[in-house]
Amino acid sequence: MAGRQAGGAGSGAVGELRSRGAVISHALCVIDREAGGSEALAEIDVRLAPLFRIHELGPG
């Protein structure tokens, strides 16, 4: 999922990989932009594990 938004693209990637037999329960990202990606992945039973959340990095 590098370089993609976890919500839409991540969910699509998980669906594609699962259709090919992959078992996916967790996803890793560097920065969670807190824009719904974690919730979108949770809806398909994938737990997002960010290294940082955007609010932890200070004002943008």
Image (cartoon, helix red, strand yellow):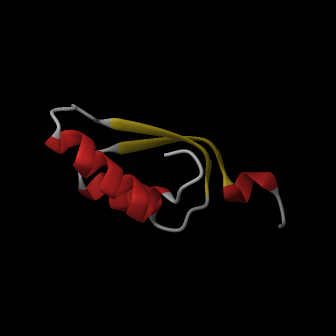
Image quadrant of residue 17?
top left
Instruction: Count numbered badges in the picture.
Output: 0
Q: Residue furthest right?
A: 59
Residue 23, horizontal then vertical, whole percent: 21, 31
Q: Is residue 5 above or below residue 53?
A: below
- Describe residue 43's horizontal placement relative to residue 40 as left or right: left
Q: Which residue is drawn at the image coordinates 82% and 58% (left, top)? A: 58
Q: Which residue is drawn at the image coordinates 56% and 62% (left, top)? A: 34
Residue 48, horizontal then vertical, whole percent: 44, 44
Could you say which is closer to the camera, residue 38 or residue 20? 20
Residue 42, horizontal then vertical, whole percent: 31, 53
- Describe residue 39's horizontal placement relative to residue 14 as left or right: right
Q: Which residue is drawn at the image coordinates 41% and 59% (left, top)? A: 9
- Describe residue 56's horizontal placement relative to residue 13 as left or right: right
Q: Is residue 21 above or below residue 58?
A: above
Q: Where is the C terminus found, in terms of image quarters?
A: bottom right
